[in-house]
Amino acid sequence: MDALIITCLFLFLLFFAIFLKEWYRYSVEKRKLIDHVYDVTGCKIYDVRKPETASERLIKRILRYGDDYAAVGQRLNFFSESHEVEDWLLKAGRPLDLTVARFQGVKIVMALLGVIVGCVFFILGVPFSQFGLVLWPLFGYFLPIFWLKRKARERQNQIRYDLPEFLDTVSVTLQAGVGLDQALREVIRFFNGPIREEFSRFNQEIDLGVPREKAYEQLLRRNDNPEFQLLIKALIQGMRLGVPIAVTFKLQAENMRRMRKELVKEKAAKASPKVTLITTFVVAPTAMLMIGGLMVLHILEKAKTFSGILK
């Protein structure tokens, strides 16, 4: 019995030593890989993508069924032709690893789900379910289109919000004597979201030998934000004319802050008529109905009291 215990203890220590050795080798290789990625891309952060949640994994698994209906979706491309979908995907940052073919198939899958939902409601006798036989498939078909457009719009708005701070930081870095590529690599580490994604991809394209002007054009193609396009066009013009890049970034940051203030003022001016409209057609009639109803109830109560006195 003692010999068995000693043997098990010896085997445990042996396997634990092997585990420690392999773990050390794994850590060394991991560090070498991170250093190599930093040498190539200039970014030490290797976990750029956020870990997927259970809901995202489930949605991606469902979206894979769109591949089976991709051919049908590309034929039935009402309000979503392939070149339009490609443009939406670029501006939205390709959410959920969607491709044009898969997105076209997802529309058909959602339309079929709408048919199933409409038939189930019709069989159960839900009110107005006969209209649902047509409306639910249409809703399923157009839902991915509306969702993708909204994602693209939100991403462009996020770029608009982060761009002035990004430009200020890059401008200060450039004024310190750092080159543009190195400044972008250093600054994007402190930003998250689409700004980091776009300029990380820009740096990777430059490292792979893509001409700088071509990389700028790809940035313009992936983003239709007016402020962002103004910046890239200014960089292209400055590159051609030899204007200092630090001055370009500083001026663009000031212009974008001024444009943001004007945009806020414009939204505030548009909000006032909307508030007046809601007050006129919702709040005021509701208040009048409540006051009128109380007056009617008061009159009825007085009439009931008076009739009781007469009796």
Image (tube, rainbow, N blue to C red):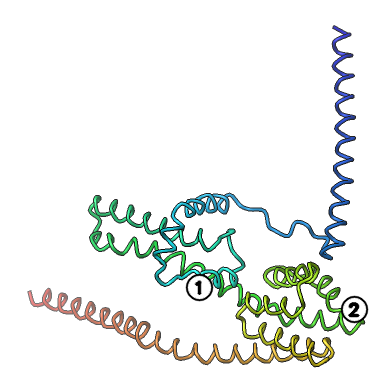
Q: Residue at x 74, y 72 (%)?
A: 202
| Quarter of image, res 111 | bottom left
Quarter in which the C terminus is drawn: bottom left
User: Mark on residue 260?
Assistant: none
- Element carrying mark 2: loop
Residue marked by disc 2: 178
Amino acid type at circle 1 is Glu
* 277 or 248, nearer to the observer: 248
Q: In the image, is 295 to the left or to the right of 270?
A: left
Compared across the picture, whether 265 is left or right of 270 comes to right
Looking at the rendered image, the quarter that the N terminus falls into is top right
User: Separation of disc 1 and disc 2 at Cα?
Assistant: 39 Å
N-term-proximal mark, 1 vs 2: 1
Residue appearing at x 65%, y 90% in the figure? 259
Residue 203, x across and y down, in percent: 78, 70
Where does label 1 land, which residue? 84
Residue lying at the far left of the rendered structure: 311
Task: Decide which of 287, 274 is in the foreground and name it.
Answer: 274
Mark 1 element type: helix
